[in-house]
Image: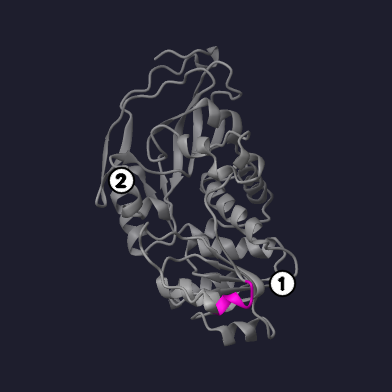
Protein backbone atom coordinates (compact mmCIF):
# COMPACT_ATOMS: atom_id res chain seq x y z
CA UNK A 1 0.00 0.00 0.00
CA UNK A 2 1.29 3.43 -0.91
CA UNK A 3 0.59 6.66 0.91
CA UNK A 4 1.16 10.21 -0.29
CA UNK A 5 2.70 11.38 2.97
CA UNK A 6 5.95 10.43 4.66
CA UNK A 7 3.97 10.38 7.90
CA UNK A 8 2.79 6.90 6.84
CA UNK A 9 6.33 5.58 6.70
CA UNK A 10 6.87 2.32 8.57
CA UNK A 11 3.19 1.46 8.88
CA UNK A 12 3.36 -1.21 6.19
CA UNK A 13 0.40 -2.82 4.44
CA UNK A 14 -2.90 -3.43 6.20
CA UNK A 15 -3.71 -7.10 5.70
CA UNK A 16 -6.61 -9.28 6.77
CA UNK A 17 -9.08 -6.40 7.08
CA UNK A 18 -12.42 -7.48 8.55
CA UNK A 19 -15.79 -5.74 8.56
CA UNK A 20 -19.23 -6.62 9.89
CA UNK A 21 -21.53 -6.78 6.87
CA UNK A 22 -25.26 -6.32 7.37
CA UNK A 23 -27.14 -8.37 4.76
CA UNK A 24 -30.68 -7.40 5.66
CA UNK A 25 -33.42 -9.04 7.73
CA UNK A 26 -31.24 -8.76 10.84
CA UNK A 27 -28.39 -10.89 9.42
CA UNK A 28 -24.77 -9.92 10.13
CA UNK A 29 -21.50 -11.61 9.27
CA UNK A 30 -17.83 -10.72 9.70
CA UNK A 31 -16.12 -10.87 6.33
CA UNK A 32 -12.94 -9.85 4.56
CA UNK A 33 -13.07 -6.31 3.21
CA UNK A 34 -10.78 -4.47 0.77
CA UNK A 35 -7.94 -2.77 2.60
CA UNK A 36 -8.25 1.02 2.65
CA UNK A 37 -5.69 3.52 1.46
CA UNK A 38 -5.50 7.22 2.29
CA UNK A 39 -5.65 9.50 -0.74
CA UNK A 40 -4.84 13.23 -0.72
CA UNK A 41 -6.40 14.90 2.31
CA UNK A 42 -7.64 11.59 3.67
CA UNK A 43 -6.76 9.46 6.67
CA UNK A 44 -7.17 5.80 7.56
CA UNK A 45 -7.93 4.87 11.16
CA UNK A 46 -7.67 1.57 12.98
CA UNK A 47 -10.96 1.32 14.85
CA UNK A 48 -10.75 1.01 18.62
CA UNK A 49 -14.46 1.17 19.52
CA UNK A 50 -17.83 1.94 17.95
CA UNK A 51 -21.23 2.34 19.56
CA UNK A 52 -24.41 0.75 18.24
CA UNK A 53 -27.08 3.35 17.49
CA UNK A 54 -30.82 2.81 17.41
CA UNK A 55 -30.79 3.50 13.67
CA UNK A 56 -28.42 0.53 13.22
CA UNK A 57 -31.26 -1.65 14.54
CA UNK A 58 -34.00 -0.32 12.23
CA UNK A 59 -34.47 -3.02 9.62
CA UNK A 60 -36.86 -0.87 7.58
CA UNK A 61 -34.11 1.78 7.36
CA UNK A 62 -31.06 -0.43 6.82
CA UNK A 63 -32.48 -3.23 4.65
CA UNK A 64 -32.76 -0.92 1.65
CA UNK A 65 -29.00 -0.26 1.89
CA UNK A 66 -27.89 -3.87 2.42
CA UNK A 67 -25.30 -5.20 2.06
CA UNK A 68 -23.77 -2.43 4.14
CA UNK A 69 -21.28 -1.89 6.97
CA UNK A 70 -23.17 -0.26 9.83
CA UNK A 71 -21.83 1.94 12.64
CA UNK A 72 -21.30 5.69 12.82
CA UNK A 73 -19.94 6.29 16.34
CA UNK A 74 -16.28 5.27 15.86
CA UNK A 75 -13.10 6.10 17.72
CA UNK A 76 -9.76 4.97 16.33
CA UNK A 77 -6.03 5.53 15.86
CA UNK A 78 -4.74 7.21 12.73
CA UNK A 79 -2.54 4.73 10.82
CA UNK A 80 -2.24 6.50 7.46
CA UNK A 81 -2.23 10.18 6.55
CA UNK A 82 -2.73 11.35 2.99
CA UNK A 83 -0.92 14.39 1.63
CA UNK A 84 -2.27 17.58 3.20
CA UNK A 85 -4.34 15.95 5.92
CA UNK A 86 -3.79 17.77 9.26
CA UNK A 87 -3.23 14.71 11.46
CA UNK A 88 -0.35 12.50 12.57
CA UNK A 89 0.00 8.75 12.63
CA UNK A 90 -0.88 7.66 16.17
CA UNK A 91 -3.48 10.36 16.82
CA UNK A 92 -6.53 8.93 18.61
CA UNK A 93 -9.55 10.50 16.95
CA UNK A 94 -13.31 10.68 16.77
CA UNK A 95 -14.65 10.61 13.22
CA UNK A 96 -18.00 12.03 12.15
CA UNK A 97 -19.63 10.10 9.32
CA UNK A 98 -21.39 13.03 7.55
CA UNK A 99 -20.27 16.61 6.86
CA UNK A 100 -22.06 19.55 5.19
CA UNK A 101 -20.77 21.97 2.55
CA UNK A 102 -21.30 25.04 4.81
CA UNK A 103 -22.12 27.10 1.70
CA UNK A 104 -25.63 26.17 0.52
CA UNK A 105 -28.80 27.94 1.62
CA UNK A 106 -29.59 25.25 4.18
CA UNK A 107 -26.13 25.42 5.73
CA UNK A 108 -26.13 29.20 5.89
CA UNK A 109 -29.54 29.12 7.61
CA UNK A 110 -28.21 26.74 10.28
CA UNK A 111 -29.85 23.58 8.91
CA UNK A 112 -26.61 21.94 7.81
CA UNK A 113 -27.81 18.38 8.47
CA UNK A 114 -30.26 18.83 5.58
CA UNK A 115 -27.46 19.79 3.17
CA UNK A 116 -27.15 17.55 0.08
CA UNK A 117 -23.44 17.03 0.76
CA UNK A 118 -24.21 16.03 4.35
CA UNK A 119 -26.46 13.25 3.08
CA UNK A 120 -23.92 12.20 0.42
CA UNK A 121 -20.73 12.02 2.53
CA UNK A 122 -19.88 8.97 4.62
CA UNK A 123 -16.95 7.10 6.09
CA UNK A 124 -15.71 4.06 4.17
CA UNK A 125 -16.94 1.41 4.77
CA UNK A 126 -18.55 2.18 8.16
CA UNK A 127 -17.82 2.15 11.87
CA UNK A 128 -18.03 -1.64 12.29
CA UNK A 129 -14.83 -2.29 10.36
CA UNK A 130 -11.30 -2.81 11.62
CA UNK A 131 -10.01 0.01 9.40
CA UNK A 132 -11.88 3.04 8.08
CA UNK A 133 -10.96 5.45 5.29
CA UNK A 134 -12.06 8.98 6.14
CA UNK A 135 -12.71 11.18 3.06
CA UNK A 136 -11.04 14.57 2.78
CA UNK A 137 -14.31 16.47 3.33
CA UNK A 138 -14.79 14.73 6.68
CA UNK A 139 -11.14 15.17 7.62
CA UNK A 140 -11.33 18.91 6.98
CA UNK A 141 -14.50 19.54 8.97
CA UNK A 142 -15.23 16.91 11.59
CA UNK A 143 -12.38 14.70 12.78
CA UNK A 144 -11.13 15.50 16.28
CA UNK A 145 -8.20 14.33 18.37
CA UNK A 146 -9.48 13.03 21.70
CA UNK A 147 -8.03 14.32 24.97
CA UNK A 148 -5.68 11.88 26.71
CA UNK A 149 -8.02 11.57 29.67
CA UNK A 150 -11.08 10.66 27.60
CA UNK A 151 -11.88 6.95 27.34
CA UNK A 152 -12.76 5.29 24.06
CA UNK A 153 -16.23 4.66 25.46
CA UNK A 154 -16.79 8.35 26.11
CA UNK A 155 -15.49 9.11 22.63
CA UNK A 156 -18.17 6.92 21.07
CA UNK A 157 -20.83 9.04 22.80
CA UNK A 158 -19.79 12.28 21.08
CA UNK A 159 -22.05 11.75 18.06
CA UNK A 160 -25.23 10.75 19.92
CA UNK A 161 -24.75 13.60 22.42
CA UNK A 162 -24.27 16.02 19.52
CA UNK A 163 -27.57 14.86 17.98
CA UNK A 164 -29.31 15.49 21.29
CA UNK A 165 -27.63 18.87 21.70
CA UNK A 166 -28.80 19.93 18.25
CA UNK A 167 -32.34 18.86 19.06
CA UNK A 168 -32.46 20.65 22.40
CA UNK A 169 -31.13 23.83 20.83
CA UNK A 170 -33.84 23.60 18.17
CA UNK A 171 -36.48 23.07 20.87
CA UNK A 172 -35.15 25.97 22.95
CA UNK A 173 -34.19 24.07 26.11
CA UNK A 174 -32.51 26.42 28.54
CA UNK A 175 -32.40 28.00 32.00
CA UNK A 176 -35.62 28.16 33.97
CA UNK A 177 -37.61 25.96 31.59
CA UNK A 178 -39.41 22.70 32.32
CA UNK A 179 -38.62 19.69 30.11
CA UNK A 180 -40.37 16.34 29.77
CA UNK A 181 -38.52 13.41 28.21
CA UNK A 182 -40.68 10.51 27.01
CA UNK A 183 -38.63 7.31 27.12
CA UNK A 184 -35.64 6.37 29.29
CA UNK A 185 -33.56 4.43 26.80
CA UNK A 186 -29.96 5.47 26.24
CA UNK A 187 -30.94 8.57 24.25
CA UNK A 188 -33.67 9.56 26.68
CA UNK A 189 -31.22 9.39 29.57
CA UNK A 190 -28.72 11.52 27.68
CA UNK A 191 -31.54 13.97 26.91
CA UNK A 192 -32.26 14.24 30.63
CA UNK A 193 -28.60 14.76 31.51
CA UNK A 194 -28.11 17.44 28.87
CA UNK A 195 -31.31 19.30 29.78
CA UNK A 196 -30.00 19.54 33.33
CA UNK A 197 -26.64 20.86 32.10
CA UNK A 198 -28.37 23.43 29.88
CA UNK A 199 -30.13 24.80 32.94
CA UNK A 200 -33.61 23.31 32.79
CA UNK A 201 -35.53 24.06 35.98
CA UNK A 202 -37.25 20.68 36.16
CA UNK A 203 -36.66 17.54 34.11
CA UNK A 204 -39.38 14.90 34.08
CA UNK A 205 -38.72 11.50 32.50
CA UNK A 206 -41.63 9.26 31.57
CA UNK A 207 -40.80 5.55 31.38
CA UNK A 208 -43.29 2.65 31.61
CA UNK A 209 -40.50 0.07 32.07
CA UNK A 210 -39.91 -0.09 35.81
CA UNK A 211 -36.39 -1.48 35.37
CA UNK A 212 -35.29 1.64 33.53
CA UNK A 213 -36.63 4.22 35.93
CA UNK A 214 -33.81 4.14 38.53
CA UNK A 215 -31.25 5.30 35.93
CA UNK A 216 -33.37 8.37 35.19
CA UNK A 217 -33.87 9.08 38.88
CA UNK A 218 -30.09 8.86 39.41
CA UNK A 219 -29.72 11.77 37.00
CA UNK A 220 -31.92 13.90 39.23
CA UNK A 221 -35.03 13.66 37.06
CA UNK A 222 -38.55 13.28 38.36
CA UNK A 223 -39.69 9.93 36.98
CA UNK A 224 -43.28 9.07 36.04
CA UNK A 225 -44.65 5.76 34.71
CA UNK A 226 -46.97 7.19 32.05
CA UNK A 227 -47.84 10.26 29.99
CA UNK A 228 -50.30 11.64 32.52
CA UNK A 229 -50.89 15.38 32.16
CA UNK A 230 -52.14 15.74 35.75
CA UNK A 231 -49.03 14.00 37.10
CA UNK A 232 -46.83 16.25 34.97
CA UNK A 233 -48.61 19.35 36.28
CA UNK A 234 -48.03 18.18 39.83
CA UNK A 235 -44.34 17.52 39.14
CA UNK A 236 -43.95 20.95 37.51
CA UNK A 237 -45.80 22.91 40.16
CA UNK A 238 -49.08 23.37 38.32
CA UNK A 239 -48.13 23.97 34.70
CA UNK A 240 -47.19 21.88 31.69
CA UNK A 241 -43.82 21.59 29.97
CA UNK A 242 -42.03 24.12 27.82
CA UNK A 243 -40.47 21.27 25.83
CA UNK A 244 -41.54 17.65 25.43
CA UNK A 245 -38.96 15.42 23.74
CA UNK A 246 -40.26 12.06 22.53
CA UNK A 247 -37.56 9.39 22.40
CA UNK A 248 -39.79 6.51 21.30
CA UNK A 249 -41.69 5.59 18.14
CA UNK A 250 -44.54 4.05 20.15
CA UNK A 251 -47.71 5.50 18.60
CA UNK A 252 -49.57 5.96 21.86
CA UNK A 253 -46.70 7.84 23.46
CA UNK A 254 -46.26 10.02 20.39
CA UNK A 255 -49.87 11.16 20.71
CA UNK A 256 -49.97 11.34 24.52
CA UNK A 257 -46.97 13.68 24.44
CA UNK A 258 -49.18 16.35 22.88
CA UNK A 259 -51.10 16.73 26.15
CA UNK A 260 -47.93 17.46 28.14
CA UNK A 261 -46.87 20.72 26.45
CA UNK A 262 -48.04 24.05 27.80
CA UNK A 263 -48.99 27.20 25.85
CA UNK A 264 -46.44 27.96 23.10
CA UNK A 265 -44.66 24.76 24.04
CA UNK A 266 -42.70 22.42 21.76
CA UNK A 267 -43.18 18.70 21.15
CA UNK A 268 -40.10 17.28 19.46
CA UNK A 269 -40.08 13.84 17.88
CA UNK A 270 -36.60 12.38 18.21
CA UNK A 271 -37.30 8.77 17.13
CA UNK A 272 -38.54 8.14 13.57
CA UNK A 273 -41.26 5.83 12.36
CA UNK A 274 -41.05 4.01 8.99
CA UNK A 275 -42.05 6.07 5.94
CA UNK A 276 -45.71 5.58 5.17
CA UNK A 277 -46.58 4.46 8.70
CA UNK A 278 -49.47 6.59 9.89
CA UNK A 279 -49.53 7.81 13.49
CA UNK A 280 -52.86 9.15 14.79
CA UNK A 281 -52.34 12.48 16.54
CA UNK A 282 -54.98 14.55 18.32
CA UNK A 283 -53.91 17.82 16.72
CA UNK A 284 -57.05 19.54 17.96
CA UNK A 285 -55.67 19.20 21.47
CA UNK A 286 -52.75 21.51 20.71
CA UNK A 287 -54.36 24.05 18.37
CA UNK A 288 -55.51 26.48 21.05
CA UNK A 289 -52.16 26.24 22.87
CA UNK A 290 -50.14 27.02 19.71
CA UNK A 291 -47.86 24.07 20.34
CA UNK A 292 -45.07 23.54 17.82
CA UNK A 293 -44.40 20.01 16.54
CA UNK A 294 -40.89 19.41 15.26
CA UNK A 295 -38.37 16.74 14.36
CA UNK A 296 -34.60 16.77 14.51
CA UNK A 297 -32.02 14.85 12.52
CA UNK A 298 -28.34 14.15 13.21
CA UNK A 299 -25.72 16.78 14.14
CA UNK A 300 -23.49 19.27 12.37
CA UNK A 301 -19.83 20.15 12.96
CA UNK A 302 -20.59 22.82 15.58
CA UNK A 303 -22.76 20.37 17.52
CA UNK A 304 -19.99 17.77 17.42
CA UNK A 305 -17.40 20.23 18.73
CA UNK A 306 -19.67 21.38 21.55
CA UNK A 307 -20.55 17.79 22.51
CA UNK A 308 -16.86 16.91 22.63
CA UNK A 309 -16.22 19.90 24.90
CA UNK A 310 -19.11 18.97 27.21
CA UNK A 311 -17.79 15.42 27.61
CA UNK A 312 -14.12 16.42 27.89
CA UNK A 313 -14.90 18.98 30.60
CA UNK A 314 -16.96 16.48 32.59
CA UNK A 315 -20.04 18.73 32.52
CA UNK A 316 -21.94 15.90 30.85
CA UNK A 317 -21.36 12.40 32.22
CA UNK A 318 -22.91 9.66 30.13
CA UNK A 319 -20.62 6.62 30.38
CA UNK A 320 -23.06 4.88 32.71
CA UNK A 321 -25.55 4.40 29.87
CA UNK A 322 -23.09 1.97 28.22
CA UNK A 323 -24.09 -1.27 29.89
CA UNK A 324 -22.28 -3.72 27.60
CA UNK A 325 -18.86 -3.80 25.91
CA UNK A 326 -18.72 -6.58 23.32
CA UNK A 327 -15.69 -7.74 21.29
CA UNK A 328 -15.90 -7.21 17.54
CA UNK A 329 -15.74 -10.98 16.97
CA UNK A 330 -19.09 -11.26 18.76
CA UNK A 331 -20.92 -8.55 16.83
CA UNK A 332 -23.99 -10.81 16.43
CA UNK A 333 -24.31 -11.00 20.21
CA UNK A 334 -23.90 -7.24 20.47
CA UNK A 335 -26.84 -6.68 18.13
CA UNK A 336 -28.93 -9.28 19.95
CA UNK A 337 -28.38 -7.50 23.25
CA UNK A 338 -29.32 -4.18 21.68
CA UNK A 339 -32.38 -5.45 19.81
CA UNK A 340 -33.90 -7.26 22.78
CA UNK A 341 -33.37 -4.35 25.14
CA UNK A 342 -31.24 -6.51 27.40
CA UNK A 343 -28.56 -3.86 26.95
CA UNK A 344 -29.20 -0.16 27.34
CA UNK A 345 -26.26 0.84 25.14
CA UNK A 346 -23.67 -1.42 23.50
CA UNK A 347 -20.13 -0.44 22.48
CA UNK A 348 -18.19 -2.81 20.26
CA UNK A 349 -14.50 -2.99 21.11
CA UNK A 350 -11.79 -3.86 18.57
CA UNK A 351 -8.78 -4.05 20.92
Q: Position of residue 223 (x, y in %)?
A: 56, 78
Specify whether residue 288 is painted magenta: yes
Q: Where, quadrant-wise, is the C terminus in this rendering?
A: top left
The relative height of residue 107 versus residue 90 in the rendered view (above or below) is: below
Which residue is rendered at x = 61% and y = 52% of the image? 166
Looking at the image, residue 178 sits to the left or right of residue 77; the answer is right
Q: Position of residue 255 (x, y in %)?
A: 47, 74
Looking at the image, residue 120 sits to the left or right of residue 189; the answer is left
Which residue is rendered at x = 30% and y = 29% of the image? 33
Q: Position of residue 69 (x, y in %)?
A: 35, 39
In the image, which disc is placed on residue 64? 2
In the image, 142 versus 258, the foreground residue is: 258
Q: Where, quadrant-wise, is the N terminus in this rendering?
A: top left
Looking at the image, residue 1 sits to the left or right of residue 306; the answer is left
In the image, which disc is placed on residue 15? none
Residue 13 visible, this angle:
yes
Q: Using a 10 Å C-alpha cutoff, classify the residue at mark 1 as few (fewer than 14 neighbours), some (14 to 19) or many (20 or more).
A: some
Question: Which region is colored magenta?
Answer: 285-290
Give yes or no for contact between labels 1 and 2 (Cβ–Cβ under 8 Å): no
Q: How is the image coloured?
A: one colour
In the image, 5 versus 254, the foreground residue is: 254
Which residue is rendered at x = 58% and y = 17% of the image? 84
The relative height of residue 269 versus residue 150 in the rendered view (above or below) is: below
Circle 1 or circle 2, nearest the eye: 2
Specify whether residue 82 is painted magenta: no
Q: Which residue is mark 1?
A: 201
Report, in whole angstroms, how far the alpha carbon at label 1 lies from the one at label 2. Answer: 43 Å
Amino acid sequence: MECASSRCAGMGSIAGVKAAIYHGAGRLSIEDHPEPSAGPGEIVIRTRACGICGTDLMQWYQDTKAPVVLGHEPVGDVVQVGEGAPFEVGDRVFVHHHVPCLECELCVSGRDTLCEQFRATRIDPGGLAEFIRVPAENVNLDVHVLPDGMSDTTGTLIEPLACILRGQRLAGVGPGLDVVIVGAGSMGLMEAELARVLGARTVVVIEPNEARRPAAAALGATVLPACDADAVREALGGGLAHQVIVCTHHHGAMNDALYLAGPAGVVQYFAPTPPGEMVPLDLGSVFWREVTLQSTYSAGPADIRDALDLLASGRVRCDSIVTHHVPFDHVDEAFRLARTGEALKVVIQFD
